[in-house]
Image (tube, helix red, strand yellow):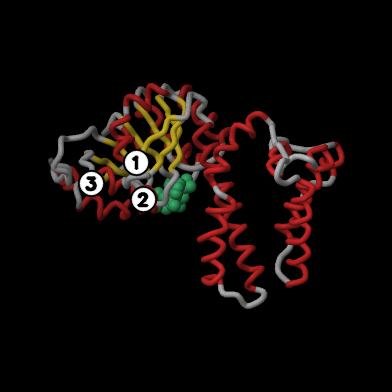
Amino acid sequence: MSDPNLVGMTTQHSTGPQHKPVTLLGLGPMGKALADTLLEKGHPLTVWNRSPEKADGLVARGARRARTVAEAVTASPLTLVCLTDYDTMHKVLEPAAEALAGRAVVNLNSGTPAEARAAVQWSEDRGVDYLDGAIMVPPPMVGQPGAVFLYSGSQAVYEQHSEALTSLGDPRYLGDDPGLAVLYNTALLDMMYSTLNGWLHATALVGSANVPAREFAELALGWFMPVVVDYAALARLAPDLDAGHYPGTLSTLVMNLNALDHITRTSEEQGVHSGHPRLMKEIAERAIAEGHGGESYLAVHELFKKATLSKEETSTPLP
Ligand code: NAP
């Protein structure tokens, strides 16, 4: 063994049984967390990164640093990809396509469903077994309980490499449509940003009267969100969303429009940004115009399901 990195291969950190070898392409913050976890769980690990020095610490702990992508992918039956995006993945994998043929690739970078489906086509054309994935947690949570990883596409690849995928976290297979993992990922991030914006805008609103965020947080996050908004109750109403059934028994969309109008006008009065509440108000107004005024607020779901609402809206898009 003349390569000193290969000597490092003998030093694994797990005292448990030897796991299957894994190759990892990409050592950004997330790739580094994946690599640390794989080493900790006892997988013989080969890594490649555009900036090779980022592997120094991993090599010291027993990983092997490959000089080329082709060398990296031939070291293991499974290659994990964690690069910036799909374009980067194609740029990195294309020169190694021949070496990849007959091997499995699990891609973990973020993107769109169309990009995931295009990656499947790219792989099929080159005889590569491909599974698409998405990581739902930040780097420090990788390998910890509750670290959900989403996968979709080839069930065969998912099952064949489930041991390595389980080392990274809690794997969830969503189905054979390869676009589903990144679609779920985007949908969950959509919900996260909307919720964060709600909290941040509300904090700016009370902040306009010099209320500190730490004081508002107790009522807003400690009581209002869990008790009044009540995510468990929303989950119980999910079948109604599937059925398009929004009974306005306790409050109607028209009543909610009143509240959205007050939030918009109060924002203006208090000198805080009113674009966010105005957009919510316009969406509710459009739902009412479409005949949902007597239903509950959840009826705005009917608008969100459409790309456009009417001929007029295609010429005057929402701000
Ligand atoms: P990142 O900045 O998105 O990706 C960095 C990696 O991509 C590095 O390995 C970098 O190489 C490589 N790279 C970028 N351009 C390249 C190119 N033209 N050629 C070759 N390699 C290139 O950082 P990250 O946080 O590790 O994220 C990786 C993926 O995980 C992303 O798709 C991200 O959306 C997803 N993700 C991240 C998080 C998070 O919290 N970080 C959470 C969930 C999902 P160099 O080191 O040489 O620059």
Amino acid type, label 1: Gly
Q: Residues within 10 Å of mark 1 (few under 14, many from 20)?
A: many
The residue that appears at 73% across and 72% down in the rendered structure is: 270
Residue placed furthest toward the bottom: 210
Mark in the foreground, 1 or 3? 1
Q: CA distance from mark 1 to mark 3?
A: 13 Å
Q: Is residue 155 above or below residue 304?
A: above
User: What residue would you read off at disc 3?
Assistant: 40
Mark in the foreground, 2 or 3? 2
The answer to whether mark 1 is within 8 Å of ligand 1 is no
Percent x, y of residue 96 = 38, 33
The residue that appears at 34% across and 41% down in the rendered structure is: 169
Circles 1 and 3, Cβ within 8 Å, touching? The answer is no
Amino acid type, label 3: Glu
The residue that appears at 23% across and 32% down in the rendered structure is: 20
Percent x, y of residue 166 = 31, 36
Secondary structure beneath dot 3 equals helix
Q: CA distance from mark 2 to mark 3?
A: 14 Å
User: What residue would you read off at disc 1?
Assistant: 169
Q: CA distance from mark 2 to mark 1?
A: 9 Å
Q: Is residue 249 visible?
A: yes
Q: Quadrant of residue 24?
A: top left
Q: Is residue 2 visible?
A: no
- Of labels 2 and 1, earlier in sequence is 2
Circles 2 and 1, Cβ within 8 Å, touching? The answer is yes
Secondary structure beneath dot 1 equals loop
Q: Is residue 60 above or below residue 74?
A: below
The residue that appears at 32% across and 25% down in the rendered structure is: 160
Between 210 and 10, the residue placed more toward the observer is: 210
User: What residue would you read off at disc 2?
Assistant: 141
Q: Residues within 10 Å of mark 3 (few under 14, many from 20)?
A: some
